[in-house]
Amino acid sequence: MSRPTTGGTRRDGESVGLQHEDGTPSYEVRCSGTDQVTLTFPGPEAHIHHIDHKA
């Protein structure tokens, strides 16, 4: 998940947990720069990219 902000720092992270069984926000996200896990409520400007992890 990345969140572009005008004049702001780009933040990338990986969703590591769902709070609701139907997949609606909020999400637990591990920030790529710090490995810190935080609860995130992505806004309409957030972009979610699905990555296919191959074994």
Image (spheres, rainbow, N blue to C red):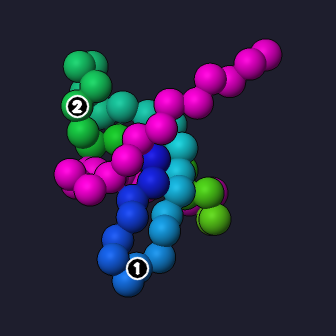
Can residue 28 be seen from the camera position used here? no
Whether residue 33 appears in magenta in the rendering, the answer is: no
- Give the numbered dot on residue 8: 1
Residue drawn at the location 39% of the way across and 59% of the way down = 3
Report helix, strand or loop for mark 2: loop
> Looking at the image, which is closer to me, 44 or 23?
44
Which residue is the site of mark 2? Answer: 24
The magenta segment: 35-55
Most distant residue in the right direction: 55
Is residue 22 left or right of 47 when viewed as pictured? left
Q: Is residue 42 magenta?
A: yes
Q: Gap in Å between the C-alphas at discs 1 and 2?
A: 26 Å
Q: Bin the neighbour count of mark 1 within 10 Å (Cα to Cα): few under 14, some 14-19, many 20 and up.
A: few
Q: Does residue 8 lie above or below 10 as drawn?
A: below
Q: Is residue 2 visible?
A: yes
Task: Identify residue type, mark 2.
Answer: Thr
Judge whether 40 appears above or below 19 on screen. below
Percent x, y for residue 25?
24, 39
The amino acid type of the residue labelled 1 equals Gly
Residue that appears at 48% across and 38% down: 49
Disc 1 or disc 2, which is closer to the eye?
1
Judged by its main secondary structure, the magenta piece is loop
Q: Name which residue lies at 27% across and 19% down.
A: 21
